[in-house]
Image (spheres, rainbow, N blue to C red):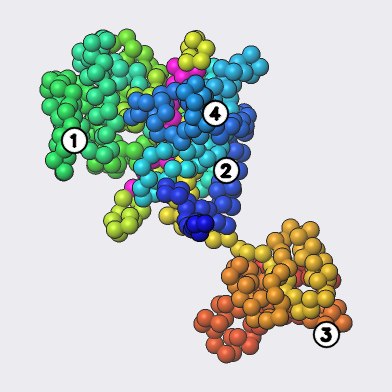
Amino acid sequence: MAKQKKQPRPKAETPKGFRDYFGAEVTERQEMLRQIAEVYDRYGFDPLETSAVETVEALGKFLPDVDRPNAGVFAFQEDGGSDDGTWLALRYDMTAPLARVAAQFRNDLPNPYRRYTMGPVWRNEKPGPGRFRQFYQCDADTVGAASVAADAEICAMLADTLEAVGIPRGDYIVRVNNRKVLNGVLEVAGLSGDDKEHERGIVLRAIDKLDKFGPDGVRLLLGEGRMDESGDFTKGAGLRAEQVEAIFQFLNARATASDDIAGRFKAIAEDDDRVNVVSSVGQVLDFERENGDDGFGTSSLVSAVTLRNLELAVAGSVEGTEGVNELRQIADLLAAQGYGPDRIVIDPSVVRGLGYYTGPVYEAELTFEITDEKGRPRQFGSVAGGGRYDDLVKRFTGQEVPATGVSIGVDRLLAALRAKGRIHGTRQGPVIVTVMDRDRMADYQAMASDLRAAGIRAEVYLGNPKNFGNQLKYADKRESPVAVIQGSDEKDRGVVQLKDLILGAKLAQDATLEEWKSQPAQTEVSRADLVQEVRAMMERHG
């Protein structure tokens, strides 16, 4: 009889594109989700938790760059592989499940329906540095409201949320655009109609690469095509020069407005000392923040001129004009609530997702600099995005249902706060009750129970208590602030020893002998005062 081959041990490794989260990373995320939920709740949104698995049919064609309905997701067939089995997949975002819920429970839900949801999503895409196949999203959406007041509300809520989690004004900006304006520009450029669908698709993909390739690269993609560094050639949309310029008139509307206003301010500087501060494009917004609506007619001059530039870019297009008017309404609604250009701006350069959304589009960008892995300074970039998607629920009902919403990348927000030093990726460990006599475990458990009842994290050492030094090493590894020690002598006298592990570590590093003697890291207190003294010791270290 052949000897059975020994089964190899499995490798203890995380699957490619996934990662594990420990201690402080988990608690920091939980705290951020709590802060975000508080803001959403104040705005009247209700929580919703959907299944992690949806039918592939319900997900549909979901990713803008994916043509096959089951590509880009982790999918499996329900009955084990027969041809007629139902295909299921892990959710790739939170919007597709919402569309299914809105259709399935449309007779039970209030209209409009406002919901927020938080949790992991999964994408079967090539992983890379900082790009994982599982990540957290935090969404808020309003389904059933056609008014752009719903879009303005989402933008305001997004600004409030960023500030609630620790991103102050000046470190972020929410930029707002509108797909209808782009449609109007395409119409003016002669790219409307069914026969131009292919060219429009190339144009959308090209302008979506604006951040990656820059204006020159996009111009090539709008024209004959672009060759990358490897020599691969991407065929362009083949637009004429005047068509390309029409599209860039749309994309540059805000930058042109800034240039225009800076020039005007410099020209009238002799008549008004206030405008002497405006000597460059970059100072226009600084001037607005300082002066606001102080004699210049609008709280956001740049936005006003931007909207005028967009009107010119879409002149003759009904849809384009409608889009500009929607942007103007959003700007007015936000200004009335006090959301000025230091927080939310109209900016046509927001192009990501324009192939997916049907109306207003918004993106939150962090404006501070960080250092990349090569030591180079760069801006942190986008942490949230969203917009109006009036066609999504229609897939289920056959009727157009207006919807708008935003998705926040929680992991990116956490990374931003760490980059700014506002969170540190560490968490104070529990108070450790050491074990001097294993026969008195009940006494030690009672001490831990008293501390927990007072809201203090505490645990009893459950390893082998024979070597006391190992107990203190364990406490250090747990980053514990205090160790509680009670031997038989302390028990008889009704006291405990408290070892300040934080102070002890500091003294061990750089204290002189005199300082070490004057600030003992270990003190004796009454057992009855255990909770009070532990709390005082912890509060001394913040």
- Number of disc labels: 4
* Crowd tier of the residue under label 3, counting other residues whose Cα lies within 10 Å: few below 14, some 14–19, many 20 or above: few
Q: Position of residue 366 (x, y in %)?
A: 40, 44
Q: Quadrant of residue 365?
A: top left
Q: Is residue 473 above or below residue 390?
A: below
* Residue under numbered circle 4: 79
Query: Mark 2 packing: few (<14 Cα in 10 Å), some, or many (20+)?
Result: some
Amino acid, disc 3: Asp
Residue that mark 1 sits on: 217
Identify the secondary structure beneath mark 1: helix
Seen at 14% across and 22% down, the residue is: 238
Q: Earlier in the sequence, mark 3 or mark 4?
A: 4
Task: Return the residue at label 2.
Answer: 33
Nearest-to-viewer mark from 3 and 4: 4
Q: Residue 156, position in %: x, y?
A: 49, 32
Q: Quadrant of the C terminus?
A: bottom right
Which amino acid type is shown beneath numbered disc 2? Answer: Leu
Give the alpha-carbon distance from disc 2 to disc 4, as whole Å. 36 Å
Q: Is residue 390 covered in magenta?
A: yes
Q: CA distance from mark 2 to mark 1?
A: 38 Å
The magenta segment is 379-393
- Which residue is found at the position 71% from the left and 65% from the top? 459
Residue at (60, 72) in percent of width and height: 476
* Label whose residue precedes the other's in the sequence (2 or 1): 2
Decide which of tag 3 and tag 1 comes sooner along the chain: 1
The residue identified by callout 3 is: 489
Alpha carbons under labels 1 and 4: distance apart: 48 Å
Spatial distance from mark 3 to mark 4, Cα to Cα? 68 Å
